Image (cartoon, rainbow, N blue to C red):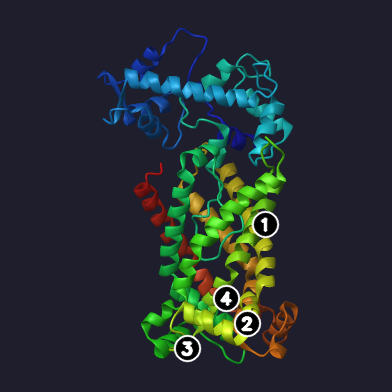
């Protein structure tokens, strides 16, 4: 356990001896193996490895940060300028950890700082982390010891290292997570947050469009499939194509894509406000309060855009010629059924947010810790495949837990056109489904839902990366 934590937070090798007479020039000459007056990525990578330091992408990040003339390498001036700037950032981090301003960091300060970043560790493990930096055996770390550990590590602070594992909403599988993406103060002040939101929204739109036929099949099976009317995957697709042609497989996709932007924006703004309400002035929000703020933000966003959810279900299930478009659909629902019809299924939808988000995040944390325990020598940055795999599995588990509520919600949305006397409540509809189709009747349509997860995640991740590059997000 300790090895995992130490590797996540600190390099294990000594990369800079603050008490010796070596200068930046000495270090530069040591790294410049071909003696051409420049250090490129390959030389820096080999040098870091020789020192016992290996962090995935560290050499590339250091060169990219310091390379002012964009020639792909660092001359001595660029190298020394990078180290000086990096030291300034390390100094700020050291001061933020040194809570009592005594010039030293102790185990309790490390424990408290990590707890505020959502990582709860024991006092014993915080002491072991401290020992990995403590050269003189005082059980405290001064500035020179801190600098020695981090000078050639590209991460500038603990928050940046921990943030590698941030559960990002970029993994859009068509069902919104309750916990919104979280941005640092630097990202907010620089305007980078809105670019990331735009990139995520575009990625979600492309992903949902690519998997729309499977999403329509899921809704079709949720509403129409039963023990007496079994609908197979192939049979369902044939039925839809015969009724409305190939284009009918994308019915309801327009409104499904359209609701991404308002939902993302409302969720983000609400999340920031709830965090302020739940946290004390000047203090970072604790993990359980962050989850609470995220759940409330998800509920707020769902409340605001829920009529679009109802429209999406109606448009997905519509027959050819029933509605000419989303506005015609909204007009007909309002005229025939009233405003209440736009909030049918709202209660199971709201109730479903908690198990979805709670299990999703719990599974994600468990998978993350398992990966770290088996790969203690790897970088704090686990790489794309690990993050995507953890996100996919955790989202799938979250869906599995909340799926019966999602099915009930969809049935209630679809049945809103029935007479008021035929409108079942959430509990009575659930009992009716179990009595008629058994427990597994609550999971009708889950096969196409699972089938769309991997392509949805893959498409959204690839598009997100291209969008980040296009928008200039590093």
Question: According to the image, label 3 marks what residue?
Answer: 322
Position above or below: 32 against 414: above
Circle number at residue 310: 4
CB atoms of marks 4 and 1 within 8 Å:
no
| Residue at 42% from the left image edge and 26% from the top image edge | 48
The residue lying toward the viewer, choosing from 52 and 396, is: 396
Give 38 or 419, whichever is nearer the viewer: 419
Is residue 473 visible in the rendered image? The answer is: yes
Residue 443 in the image, given as x and y percentages of width and height? 62, 76
Identify the mark nearer the N-term, 2 or 1: 1
Could you tell me how far apart the alpha carbons at marks 3 and 2 are, in whole angstroms?
Answer: 18 Å
Q: Residue at x 46, y 87 (%)?
A: 235
- Could you tell which of marks 3 and 2 lies nearer the N-terminus? 3
**Mark 3 residue element:** loop
Q: Residue furthest bottom?
A: 228
Q: Residue at x 42, y 69 (%)?
A: 209
The residue identified by callout 2 is: 338
Q: Quadrant of the N terminus?
A: top right
Percent coordinates x, y for residue 242 in the rendering: 40, 90
Badge 4 marks a residue whose secondary structure is helix
* Tag of residue 296: 1
For marks 4 and 2 on the same chain, the one whose residue lies earlier in the sequence: 4
Residue 151 in sight in this render: no
Q: In this rendered view, identify the residue nearer to me: 100 or 161.
A: 100
């Amino acid at each position: 356990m300790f090895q995992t934590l130490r590797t996540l937070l600190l390099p294990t090798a000594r990369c800079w001896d603050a008490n010796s007479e070596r200068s930046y020039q000495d270090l530069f000459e040591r790294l410049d193996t071909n003696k051409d007056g420049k250090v490129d990525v390959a030389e820096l990578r080999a040098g870091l490895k020789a020192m016992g330091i290996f962090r995935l992408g560290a050499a590339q990040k250091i060169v990219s940060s310091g390379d002012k003339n964009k020639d792909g390498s660092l001359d001595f001036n660029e190298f020394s300028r990078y180290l000086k700037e990096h030291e300034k950032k390390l100094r700020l981090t050291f001061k933020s950890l040194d809570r009592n301003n005594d010039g030293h960091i102790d185990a309790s300060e490390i424990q408290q700082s990590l707890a505020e970043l959502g990582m709860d560790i024991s006092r014993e493990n915080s002491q072991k982390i401290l020992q990995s930096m403590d050269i003189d055996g005082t059980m405290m770390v001064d500035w020179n010891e801190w600098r020695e550990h981090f000078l050639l590590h590209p991460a500038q602070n603990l928050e940046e290292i921990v943030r590698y594992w941030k559960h990002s909403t970029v993994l859009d599988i068509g069902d919104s997570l309750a916990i919104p993406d979280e941005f640092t103060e630097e990202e907010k002040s620089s305007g980078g947050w809105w670019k990331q939101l735009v990139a995520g929204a575009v990625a979600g739109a492309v992903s949902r469009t690519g998997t729309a036929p499977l999403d329509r099949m899921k809704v079709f099976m949720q509403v129409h499939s039963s023990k007496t009317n079994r609908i197979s995957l192939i049979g369902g697709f044939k039925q839809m194509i015969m009724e409305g042609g190939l284009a009918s497989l994308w019915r309801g996709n327009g409104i499904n894509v359209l609701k991404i932007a308002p939902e993302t924006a409302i969720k983000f703004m609400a999340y920031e406000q709830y965090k302020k309400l739940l946290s004390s002035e000047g203090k970072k929000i604790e993990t359980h309060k962050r989850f609470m703020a995220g759940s409330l933000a998800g509920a707020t966003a769902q409340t605001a855009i829920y009529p679009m959810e109802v429209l999406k279900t109606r448009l997905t299930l519509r027959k050819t010629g029933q509605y000419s478009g989303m506005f015609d659909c909204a007009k007909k629902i309002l005229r025939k059924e009233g405003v209440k019809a736009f909030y049918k299924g709202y209660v199971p939808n709201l109730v479903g947010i908690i198990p979805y988000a709670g299990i999703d995040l719990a599974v994600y944390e468990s998978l993350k810790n398992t990966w770290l325990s088996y790969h203690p020598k790897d970088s704090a940055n686990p790489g794309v495949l690990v993050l995507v795999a953890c996100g996919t599995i955790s989202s799938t588990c979250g869906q599995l837990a909340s799926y019966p509520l999602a099915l009930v919600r969809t049935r209630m949305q679809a049945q809103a056109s029935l007479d008021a006397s035929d409108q079942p409540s959430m509990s009575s509809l659930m009992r009716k489904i179990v009595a008629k189709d058994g427990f597994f009747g609550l999971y009708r349509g889950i096969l196409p839902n699972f089938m769309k997860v991997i392509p949805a995640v893959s498409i959204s991740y690839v598009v997100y990366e291209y969008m980040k590059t296009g928008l200039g997000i590093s």
